[in-house]
Amino acid sequence: MAKPAKLIAGIPQDRLTRFAERETRRFAQSRPKAAAALAAGAGAFLNGVPMHWMTDWPMPHLPLVAKASGAKLTDIDGYGIDDFCLGDTGSMFGHSPEPVARAIRKQAKRGLTYMLPTEDALEAGRLLSDTFGPFRWQIATTATDANRFSLRVARAVTGRPKVLVFNGCYHGTLDDTMVELTKGKTANRAGLVGQVHDLTLGAVVCEFNDLAAVEKTLAKGDVAAILTEPVMTNCCMVLPDPGFLQGLRDAATRHGALLIIDETHTISTGRGGYTGVHGLTPDMFVVGKCVAGGMPTAVWGMTQAIADRFAAYNATRAPGHSGMGTTLSANPMQFACLRATLEEVMTPANYAHMEAGAARLATGLAAVIARHGAPWHVVRVGARVEFICAPGPLKNGSAAHKAHQPQVEAAVHTALLNRGCLIAPFHNMMLVSPATKNRQIDRLIGAFDEILTELFAPTPDRDQE
């Protein structure tokens, strides 16, 4: 009797290998201009890329973008690409929304940065509170910075050293959160570059959806804040159990810790983010990436009660550096784009379009998975959709880690791009923007169906060279 074929996420390994090799060759052969340009000009960059995570794309080499508009990219080899990655949320509202592009042109004539506020800044503050709630706001350039500054405030007002985060979380490149559970204990994450400090002195890890562990940890009295996304995203997506987020709120209040909600990805949920749509009540709120339509901008805010506590702390603080800053943050270009996005782009009508399109995408992908009997599932949070190459739903970060199938995902991502569809490189994340058309969604579903038809064929496939 023949030995059963090894399966990876339900796919015979040899079939997956042949498929991936063919799709890799197809991509390389189809983009000679990009290959030549990279060979001639990429040598100035470390590892040939301007940002190290660009090496995470699975293609044999990167395409080079010539232009982007709405939900479409065009590369220098002339291919039009339906963009569902959208800058990993940075361009969630589409590439260069007209109100934002108009604001950039207008502000560029008036100066780029001058360390002083503008009338746009005042209006942006009002719009932030109208959109996300009556927080007292500050502006940063990245969500990493916004989270870092929020934690400084939380530690200052509580006098406590630790942040509680969830296993598998991602809150930007913030040292404090680069921890994980190892054999049930908090440890520095494996793979950190040049890490010399013991991060466990300032952080503790629990599993998402485990309120009992959170209660036990908070009872020690050394946690300044819980920092969490309402839905775990920068992994295979994990939804909160019913009552979990309210349980975090109650536990934080009971034990004197703050609750910080990071909505940098879950802003996909709807106007006001997951917090607004689901009525959450955090002490502090963070959102970045697309909040200014793609202009590098993040915002962080605190309730009036926390602002009062911070003011009291500041009154006793020795003069000197606060550890919160960055010269180019809160520049007038950010405010111009922030105002335009909040006023004209982040609208109920646009969110309704995104919600409907994402529902269409999720339903279509789920139907393909069911039709081919794949042991996969689909998750959606507003405009954000993921197919996960494992059964679901997932419970926590440990389950999300086990569900991640890099070999399958790399092959599928390259194959989708060969069929004109781009999704995020890190997981299987797709976004629907206000500019995304139903025909683009249907093309993605069709491409996904074509790929799974081959990968899950009931009889041995005959790959054509």
Image (spheres, rainbow, N blue to C red):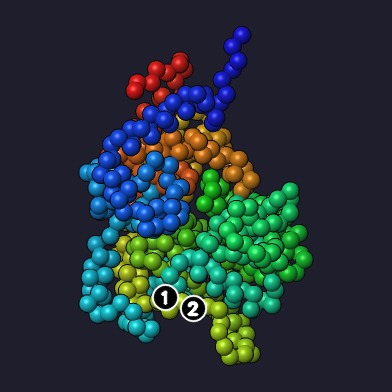
Label 2 residue SS: loop
Query: Relative to 258, is 266 above or below?
Result: above
Residue 308 falls in which quadrant of the image? Answer: bottom right
Q: Quadrant of the N terminus?
A: top right
Residue 109: give x, y in percent of width and height.
22, 77
* Distance from Cα at disc 2 to Cα at disc 1: 8 Å
* 463 shown above or below 451: above
Provide the residue designation for mark 2.
325
Relative placement, left or right, of 201 versus 287 is right
Q: Which mark is residue 329?
A: 1
Q: Quadrant of residue 439?
A: top left
Q: Are marks 2 and 1 in contact (CB under 8 Å)?
A: yes
Question: Residue at the spot x=63%, y=55% of the render?
Answer: 189
Q: Amino acid at mark 1?
A: Ser
Residue 127 location, quadrant: bottom left
Which residue is depicted at the point 38% across and 21% down?
463
Considering depth in this image, is 130 or 3 the residue closer to the camera? 3
Extreme-top residue of the structure: 1
